[in-house]
Image: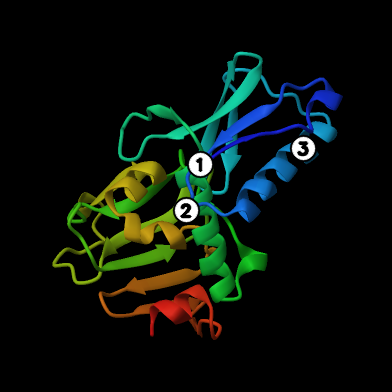
């Protein structure tokens, strides 16, 4: 699905072309267009090569044939390789918002940015299925997140058992964690095969009835 905007020329700004597939709702595409228009109305001008943060995702703007194309990172390619479209980025944003809303944490949402880093246990591999996630205070380019195995034989208190990776690499290698990386400092998430348990400042968060996480548990 290709959307070509028609609202930017009045600001002397080229129109955008936004490519995504049918898994992305019209609501989210319209939200993106409206958000871009607001920034342009407020004085921002986008040019070829600009980078645009979108929740935990990152978009690149390319000028082509008089329009501006939105690009996103190709999944799993490190260093980042860009491709036309915003499908994965809008899906990630929707997932993170729905997770936060499930836990009544939308007012505290705090996106871990794609180029920020996190700490990961050295035993967390591509085939990992069960995770422990904890978020401390973020610091400069550190998102504050720790990702480990739920049942690990390692002492994660030993720095030799940890490695620092980008949020992009962590999401690429362990996609199951992606939806939780906008939850706030003080969050602890247990991702077992058959259950998800979340606490905030040691208080349990129970998913709202009918929400994404509630549905996933039933």
Mark before the other along the chain sequence, 3 or 2: 2
Q: Residue at x 18, y 67 (%)?
A: 152
Give the percent coordinates (x, y) of residue 3. 62, 37
Outermost residue toward the left in this view: 153
Give the side of residue 150 with respect to residue 60, left or right. Answer: left
Give the percent coordinates (x, y) of residue 204. 48, 84
- Relative to 88, residue 103 above or below: below
- Total label count? 3
Query: Quick one: SS at disc 3?
Result: helix
In the foreground, 188 or 177: 177
Give the percent coordinates (x, y) of residue 66. 66, 15
Task: Tell me the distance, in whole angstroms, between the alpha carbons under discs 3 and 2.
Answer: 23 Å
Mark before the other along the chain sequence, 3 or 1: 1
The answer to which quarter of the image holds residue 217 is bottom left
* Residue at image mark 3: 37
* Residue at image mark 2: 23
Q: Residue at x 86, y 26 (%)?
A: 10
Label 3 or label 2, whichever lies nearer to me, is 2
Circle 3: is it few (<14), some (14-19), or many (20+) Cα within 10 Å? Answer: some
* Residue at image mark 1: 20
- Relative to 166, residue 179 above or below: below
Query: Quick one: SS at disc 1?
Result: loop
Task: Tell me the distance, in whole angstroms, between the alpha carbons under discs 1 and 2.
Answer: 8 Å
Give the side of residue 114 with respect to residue 4, left or right. Answer: left
Q: Are marks 3 and 1 in contact (CB under 8 Å)?
A: no
- Relative to 29, residue 146 above or below: below
- Relative to 177, residue 167 above or below: above
Give the percent coordinates (x, y) of residue 196. 37, 77
Q: Are marks 1 and 2 in contact (CB under 8 Å)?
A: yes
Q: Residue at x 28, y 80 (%)?
A: 194
Give the side of residue 157 with respect to residue 33, left or right. Answer: left
Give the position of the C terminus as an image quadrant: bottom left
């Amino acid at each position: 699905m290709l959307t070509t905007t028609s609202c930017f020329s009045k600001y002397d700004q080229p129109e955008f072309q936004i490519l995504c597939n049918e898994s992305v709702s019209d609501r989210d595409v319209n939200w993106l267009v409206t958000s871009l228009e607001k920034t342009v109305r407020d004085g921002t001008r986008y040019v070829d090569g600009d980078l645009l943060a979108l929740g935990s995702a990152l978009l690149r703007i390319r000028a082509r044939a008089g329009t501006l194309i939105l690009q996103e990172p190709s999944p799993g390619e490190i260093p980042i390789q860009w491709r036309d479209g915003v499908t994965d980025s809008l899906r990630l944003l929707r997932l993170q918002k729905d997770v936060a809303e499930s836990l009544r944490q939308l007012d505290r949402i705090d996106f871990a940015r794609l180029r920020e880093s996190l700490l990961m246990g050295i035993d967390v591999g591509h085939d990992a299925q069960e995770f422990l996630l904890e978020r401390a205070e973020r610091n400069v380019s550190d998102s504050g997140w720790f990702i480990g195995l739920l049942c690990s034989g390692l002492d994660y208190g030993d720095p030799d058992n940890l490695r620092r990776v980008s949020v992009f690499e962590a999401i690429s290698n362990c996609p199951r964690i992606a939806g939780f990386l906008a939850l706030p400092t003080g969050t602890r998430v247990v991702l077992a095969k058959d259950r998800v348990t979340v606490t905030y400042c040691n208080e349990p968060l129970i998913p709202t009835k009918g929400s994404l996480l509630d549905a996933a548990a039933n």
